[in-house]
Every structure is written in structure tokens, then in C-alpha cells.
Image (cartoon, rainbow, N blue to C red):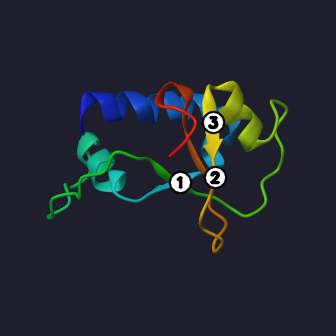
Amino acid sequence: MSDDTLHELRRLLHAVGAYRDDLVLVGGLVPEVYRLLGSFVSPRHTALWTDDVDFATLKKLEVRPDGTLTEVLKSGGYVILPSRASEPPCHFVQHAEFGTEE
């Protein structure tokens, strides 16, 4: 995992705050995260190149005192991008420094 990707993962985890326990990391970064954990056996395959972070969560989350997940992401400097997906509901966010469009 590149230092830039690790930095973005840390920044995102910090931004989601109290919602961290409600999110499950999925997608291409999972094998890379396992490689960072010395107590786990490294996956036998090479991870696909990825530059995004994918999380899954329940459809309905309890709202935390800091606000909804969308609100805490926005306050952490993230912007919500238009979604082209409808099933399951997908929301795309990126840090504002990368722009406000896909």
C-alpha cells in the first residue's frame, strides 16, 4: 500500500469518527490492510491496484451526536459525489482537495 493511500485511509477513518465501528472495509484495499497486520497470513494473490476506499454499512445507522455520517464526512472535508448506482444505495465521497466532481 502506498504512503498516499495509507494517508487517505487514515484521514477517512478520522473523519468518520464515531461511525468507525459501523463500517466494514471492503474492496481492493482489504488484502493490503491484511498485509499491514503482522499476525495475519498474507493473502496468496496480488491485490488489484486500487486508489479508493470502499466501506459497507447497514442501510440505517443510528445518528451520532456529531451528526449523520454524511454530515461528519462533510465536516471532515469530504464532498458527496453524484451516484449513478441505485442498488444497493451507493454514495461516493472524496476529499474536497481532489475536487467536487468525479
Type of the residue with mark 3: Val
Type of the residue with mark 1: Phe
Which label lies toward us, 3 or 2?
A: 2
Q: Residues within 10 Å of mark 2 (few under 14, many from 20)?
A: few
Could you say whether the residue bearing mark 2 is in a helix, strand or loop? Answer: loop
Residue at 66% from the left image edge and 71% from the top image edge:
86
Give the quarter of the image for residue 1.
top left
Query: In this figure, which residue is indicated by the disc labeled 1?
Result: 55
Could you say whether the residue bearing mark 1 is in a helix, strand or loop? Answer: strand
Q: CA distance from mark 1 to mark 2?
A: 17 Å
In the displayed structure, does residue 102 sit left or right of residue 77? left
Residue at 58% from the left image edge and 36% from the top image edge:
100
Image: 41 above or below 35: below
Which label lies toward us, 1 or 3?
A: 3
Q: CA distance from mark 1 to mark 3?
A: 16 Å
Q: Position of residue 36 (x, y in %)?
A: 27, 40
The tag on residue 79 is 3
Residue at 62% from the left image edge and 61% from the top image edge:
90
Q: Residues within 10 Å of mark 3 (few under 14, many from 20)?
A: many
Residue at 53% from the left image edge and 34% from the top image edge:
13
Which is more N-terminal, label 3 or label 1?
Answer: 1
The residue closer to the viewer here, 90 or 62, is 90
Which is more N-terminal, label 2 or label 1?
Answer: 1
Query: In this figure, which residue is indicated by the disc labeled 2?
Result: 82
Type of the residue with mark 2: Pro
Tell me whether the residue at label 1 lies in contact with that at label 3, contact meaning CB atoms closer than 8 angstroms: no
